């Protein structure tokens, strides 16, 4: 959460959250606790997003691959861009 705002900045690992630009819904991902389909991971993340929005938070997502390819000084611009697109 960004202090003094109603914005949650969610940083998602490409593998751990099955980045949809990389994975298909039926792709299986292996974890220590078992295998999960990408769509199962997305469903869990969706529940978390809906809960946050129910409590009047805006959720902005950044993906690992976005952060890796973005220079440090451009990261704020990327976040601002996502805020404009979503809201």
Image (tube, rainbow, N blue to C red):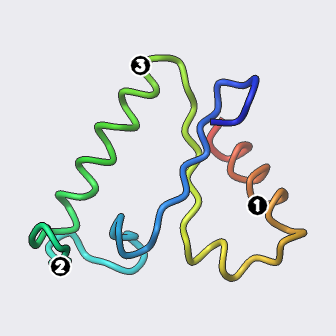
Read off the residue under disc 3.
54
- Alpha carbons under labels 1 and 3: distance apart: 25 Å
Residue 29 place in picture, x, y as percent = 20, 77
| Nearest to N terminus: mark 1 or mark 3 | 3
| Nearest to N terminus: mark 2 or mark 3 | 2
Q: Badge 1: how crowded within 10 Å, few (<14), some, or many (20+)?
A: some
In the image: residue 50, left or right of residue 2: left
Residue under the image location 79 percent in, 49 percent down: 80
Q: Are marks 2 and 1 in contact (CB under 8 Å)?
A: no
Q: Which mark lies nearer to you, 2 or 1?
A: 2
User: The residue tagged with tag 1: helix, strand or loop?
Assistant: helix
User: The residue tagged with tag 3: helix, strand or loop?
Assistant: helix
- Alpha carbons under labels 2 and 1: distance apart: 30 Å
Read off the residue under disc 1.
78
Q: Is residue 2 above or below residue 70?
A: above
Q: Badge 3: how crowded within 10 Å, few (<14), some, or many (20+)?
A: few
Q: Badge 2: how crowded within 10 Å, few (<14), some, or many (20+)?
A: few
The one nearer the camera, 22 or 72, is 72
The one nearer the camera, 31 or 22, is 31
- Alpha carbons under labels 2 and 3: distance apart: 31 Å
Q: Is residue 21 above or below residue 3?
A: below
| Nearest to N terminus: mark 2 or mark 1 | 2
User: The residue tagged with tag 2: helix, strand or loop?
Assistant: strand
Quarter of the image for residue 39 reads: bottom left
Read off the residue under disc 2.
30
The one nearer the camera, 87 or 31, is 31
List the single residue furthest toward the front: 32
């Amino acid at each position: 959460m960004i202090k003094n705002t109603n914005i949650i900045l969610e940083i998602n690992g490409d593998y751990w959250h099955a980045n949809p630009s990389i994975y298909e819904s039926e792709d299986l991902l292996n974890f220590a606790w078992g295998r999960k389909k990408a769509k199962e991971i997305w469903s869990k993340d969706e529940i978390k997003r809906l809960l946050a929005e129910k409590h009047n938070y805006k959720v902005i997502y950044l993906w690992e691959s976005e952060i890796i390819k973005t220079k440090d000084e451009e990261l704020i611009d990327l976040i601002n861009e996502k805020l404009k697109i979503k809201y």
